[in-house]
Image: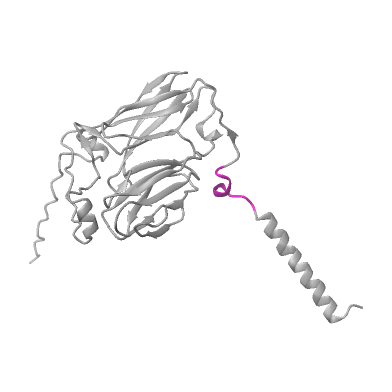
């Protein structure tokens, strides 16, 4: 018969063995671990096309507001005329709209979601320069590296506030090394703010595929490498609680080009888009007392 001490030692060895086995297995893989459900990896065939167009604003665009930076002398010195960036409109063309393929069917009948796409190995940079984020809107693929830099002579506090990804909040002093971050779950779009300077905002679109673009100062955008097929294309712009969108169905021919032009503003008023026409405030009447 084994002694009490021997039985204790054997029991401890068994427990340690089970813990080791559990650690090596790591439990079941989740979509966040694998980047998505099992799917065939998309390989270009050489007959891909493009989706390009312009984002416009119909009517008088909302005026940019002057930002008071007096709380931080470094911000005032570098950006004395800093203004808000909700609507950057020049000659009726809208910058900073995130345009992307939401879903669709390829020419072979498969769906965009049936495929997996290798995440880009090229990092994207989000810079804090002049006490605002550059760029104001950007797109990345799931698990693509984001490099955050500080070009200002002041301290910033970068705060990602996503819904589908974990919250991420980091301080970065002037001259500090670049920060690295990645978002593991698709999300349109992730708001970014600075806890030191409340006017600083940026937005990051996170997708499982590379079919997205951001409109430039002239409102133009181009999505490259799109396989032939029919797609639902969304143009997203900040505003409201969760931003505002326009949708369009687009067919991309083999080795061809498709056009998708979007318009925000007065023409979209009934769809809840920002408009140069302002709603009148509700009139409240005093309640008459009963005698």
Considering every residue shown, the one lying at the far front of the view is 175
The picture quadrant where one finds residue 258 is: top left
Residue 32 on the magenta span = yes
* Residue 76 percent location from the top left of the image: 20, 55
The answer to whether any part of residue 188 appears in the image is no
Q: Residue at (15%, 36%) from the top-left corner?
A: 60
In the picture provided, is 258 more to the left or to the right than 86?
A: right
In the picture provided, is 17 more to the left or to the right than 166?
A: right
Q: Residue at (16%, 39%) from the top-left corner?
A: 276
In the picture provided, is 18 more to the left or to the right than 287?
A: right
Considering every residue shown, the one lying at the far right of the view is 1
Residue interval drawn in magenta: 28-36
Q: Residue at (40%, 20%) from the top-left corner?
A: 257
The picture quadrant where one finds residue 154 is: bottom left
* Residue 214 percent location from the top left of the image: 35, 36
The picture quadrant where one finds residue 268 is: top left
> The C terminus appears in which quarter of the rendering?
bottom left
Residue 52 on the magenta span = no
Depth order, front residue of 282/178: 178
Depth order, front residue of 261/194: 194
Considering every residue shown, the one lying at the far bottom of the view is 4
Colouring convention used in this rendered image of the protein = one colour
Above or below, comparing residue 138 to residue 150 in the picture: above
> The N terminus appears in which quarter of the rendering?
bottom right
The answer to whether any part of residue 133 appears in the image is yes
Above or below, comparing residue 252 to residue 126 in the picture: above
* Residue 11 percent location from the top left of the image: 79, 72
* Residue 208 percent location from the top left of the image: 49, 39
* Total numbered labels placed on residues in the image: 0
Q: Residue at (44%, 41%) from the top-left corner?
A: 140
């Amino acid at each position: 018969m084994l002694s009490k001490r021997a039985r204790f030692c054997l029991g401890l060895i068994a427990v340690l063995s089970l813990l080791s086995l559990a650690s090596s297995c790591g439990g079941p893989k989740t979509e966040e671990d694998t980047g998505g459900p099992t799917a065939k990896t998309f390989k270009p065939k050489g007959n891909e096309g493009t989706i390009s167009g312009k984002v416009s604003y119909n009517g008088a665009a909302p005026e940019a507001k002057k930002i008071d930076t007096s709380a931080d002398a470094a911000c005032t010195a570098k950006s004395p005329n800093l203004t808000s960036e909700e609507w950057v409109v020049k000659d009726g063309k809208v910058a900073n709209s995130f345009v992307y393929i939401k879903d669709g069917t390829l020419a072979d009948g498969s769906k965009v979601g049936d495929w997996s796409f290798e995440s880009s190995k090229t990092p994207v940079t989000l810079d804090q320069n002049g006490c605002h984020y550059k760029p104001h809107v950007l797109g990345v693929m799931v698990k693509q590296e984001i490099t955050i830099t500080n070009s200002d002579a002041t301290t910033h506090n970068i705060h990602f506030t996503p819904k589908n990804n974990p919250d991420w909040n980091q301080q970065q002093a002037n001259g500090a090394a670049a920060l690295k971050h990645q978002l593991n779950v698709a999300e349109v779009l992730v708001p970014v703010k600075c806890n030191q300077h409340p006017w600083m905002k940026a937005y990051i679109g996170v997708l499982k595929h590379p079919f997205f673009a951001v409109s430039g100062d002239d409102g133009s955008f181009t999505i490259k490498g799109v396989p032939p097929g029919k797609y639902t294309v969304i143009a997203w712009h900040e505003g409201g609680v969760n931003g505002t969108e326009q949708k369009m169905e687009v067919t991309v021919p083999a080795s061809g080009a498709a056009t998708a032009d979007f318009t925000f503003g007065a023409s979209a008023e009934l769809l809840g888009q920002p408009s140069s026409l302002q709603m009148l405030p509700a009139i409240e009447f005093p309640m008459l007392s009963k005698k």
